[in-house]
Amino acid sequence: MSEDAINYEQYVEQMAKLIDLPIPDECLPGVIENLERMAVIAQKVTEFPLDETIEPAPTFEP
């Protein structure tokens, strides 16, 4: 594991304590797995190159 690697199990347990969110032991593996999946998706989004001239839309209209 590299220095930048996240221990998702430890992260989930600490954040659950911080926000007083009980996570049953049988649900913990699924929560960790989903967080790992979201991290992969988020990395793809945050690393997507954008041109410097692109500006955000003033309002979101679905």
Image (tube, rainbow, N blue to C red):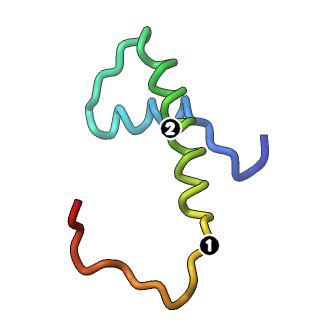
Residue 10 percent coordinates (x, y): 54, 33
Q: Residues within 10 Å of mark 1 (few under 14, many from 20)?
A: few
Residue occupying image coordinates x 54% and y 58%: 45
Residue occupying image coordinates x 46% and y 33%: 12
Task: Classify 27 as above or below 62.
Answer: above
Task: Classify 28 as above or below 60.
Answer: above
Q: Secondary structure at mark 2?
A: helix
Q: Secondary structure at mark 1?
A: loop
**Quarter of the picture holding the N terminus:** top right
2 or 1: tag closer to the N-terminus: 2
**Quarter of the picture holding the C terminus:** bottom left
Q: Which residue carries the number 1 mark? A: 49
Residue occupying image coordinates x 49% and y 30%: 34
Q: Looking at this rendering, what residue extends furthest in the bottom direction? A: 53
Could you tell me the amino acid type at mark 2? Answer: Tyr
Between 18 and 59, the residue placed more toward the observer is 59
- Between disc 2 and disc 1, the foreground one is 1
Task: Classify 27 as above or below 34.
Answer: above
